[in-house]
Image: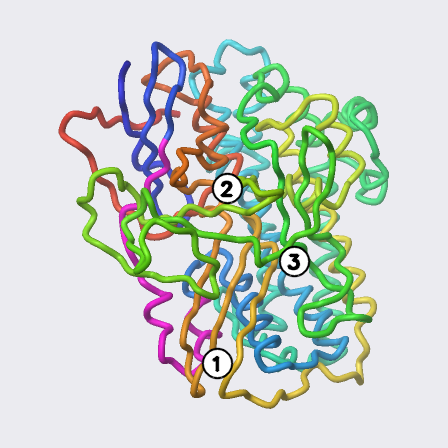
Amino acid sequence: MSSKIISPFNRVEGDLDLKIEFSGNTVVKAYAISRLFRGIEIILKEKYPMDALVITPRVCGICGGSHLLASAQALDMAYKAEVPENGVRLRNVMSMAEMGQNDARHIYLMFLIDTVNRKYEKFPFYKDMVMRWAPFYGSSYKAAVVWSKRYTEIYAIFGGQWPHGSSIVPGGITCEPTPEDIIKAKAILKTIKENFIEKVLLGGPLTQFLELKSQSDLDQWSEDYPQGDISKIWIYGKEMEWDKLGSGSQYLMSFGHLPLAENYSQGKGELRFRSGILNLKTWEIFPLEQGNIAEFVTHSFYTYTKGNVGLHPFKGETIPIMPKENGKYTFTKAFRYSLNGEYIAPEVGSLAMLSVSLNPLIVDILRRRGKSVLVREISRILRLVLIHKFVEEELGNYEPNGKTYIKPDEKNEGEGFGLVEASRGSLGHWISIKDGKINNYQIITPTQINMGPEDPFGNPSHMSQALVGTKVDYTDNPIEIVHIVRSHDACMVCNVHFLDGNQERFSVRI
């Protein structure tokens, strides 16, 4: 038995430490570690409720717009705000624009550059992968750098800037775009589609790709449009056995996303991406009840006033302790969901988002192959294509003379929650207001859900489940582990590195 820490791990905001225990070349235990406390939930206490719209987006410099949206939705509920149809549409446009830049950057700047790892030098297509996906050099890599930022330009048209645009507020959005603004956003979308999505990512027409319904359809696409990166990922990924890596939890969860403007009211209404929990063993979908959420701190650097219990976010506590206590190793709380009398640890992210919505292509691949690194990457590409189409539709339905904002009556007492799908998965904000101030504010992030510690009953979170049993070719170059973790687009913000003197530190070479 050997124990090692991969650190630093992330290529995105914050550094994730990953402790792995091996038996030979097989992972037998895995721990995702976050060692720095930021305290934003504490900072928010006693603040004016609207301050949350400025503070919470600073949780992340990549998906700050998602935090802003979740915070605004929580205040929609607390203030009983009505949001006009145009306000809903523009919120959706901004949310999807941010997701578009993230998905493009994840695919090329975070995940695919690992294909130049020395493990793959023996494959006949290695040179093609290097020419396409090598950092700073590959043709597709460079295209992603250029075109991903165009999505943020769309966000900035309606949000004022990106990151940390501030136009989403309870009651809608403060921006009143001109017809020229809408035309500009549509023009940017058109150039992204023609020069990046169709030319680089898909290798063929976007509308035709969205007609794919099955694995055999994707096989045919790969034959018809072999130069598209998705075709290469699908073919090469199977050769590199990505379809055998990183299954994890049997449950997929989505908070749901993109409300239809026609029936939105205080966070309720029909969604383009439905909410729910999918059990992959039975293929039953359970409705999501936010009241079933609990957070545990048995292995986290926190304590609860009532001891070793699970707390719903409305009753949540953030009481940090010095990171020295035995059995505790992270500042991430353990997320659990009560389903049929059992606490489950689901997976969230693009795969869950599409699966819960029963996307036919993803469902067919899952039924035939199960969960894996490969299907996660295919789902993220498909989501990018879908949201590109949805942005076009929302902009097309925008009413030039319609309201974007209805000022709500601010309440001195109340509570609300906002549940959205951020780039990395399900994101929730819960606010409690008393005497006109924030009495409690709790945030649950997708990386917390995927990569939290064990619960009090010894059950691991999804990421640990996905890693256990993984066999690596070389423990000094565990690229298989890297693929699994990065397929989730991990973002454990503001972590620092820590090593026990008895553990070996090493970096993953590419």
Answer above or below: position of 30 versus 298: above
Q: Nearer the viewer, residue 506 or 469?
A: 469
The answer to if 178 sits in the magenta stretch is no
Q: Residue at x 63, y 28 (%)?
A: 371
Which three-letter amino acid code belongs to the residue tagged 3?
Met
Q: Residue at x 41, y 71 (%)?
A: 440
Query: Quick one: label 1 or label 2, which is nearer the N terminus?
Result: 1
Mark 3 lies on a secondary structure that is helix
Tag 1–tag 2 contact (CB < 8 Å): no
The answer to if 48 sits in the magenta stretch is yes
Tag 3–tag 1 contact (CB < 8 Å): no
| Protein image colouring | rainbow
Percent from the top left, x then y, of residue 192?
69, 52
Disc 2 marks which residue?
489
Range of magenta residues: 31-57
Label 2 and label 3: CA atoms lie apart by 17 Å
- Numbered circle sitting on residue 63: none
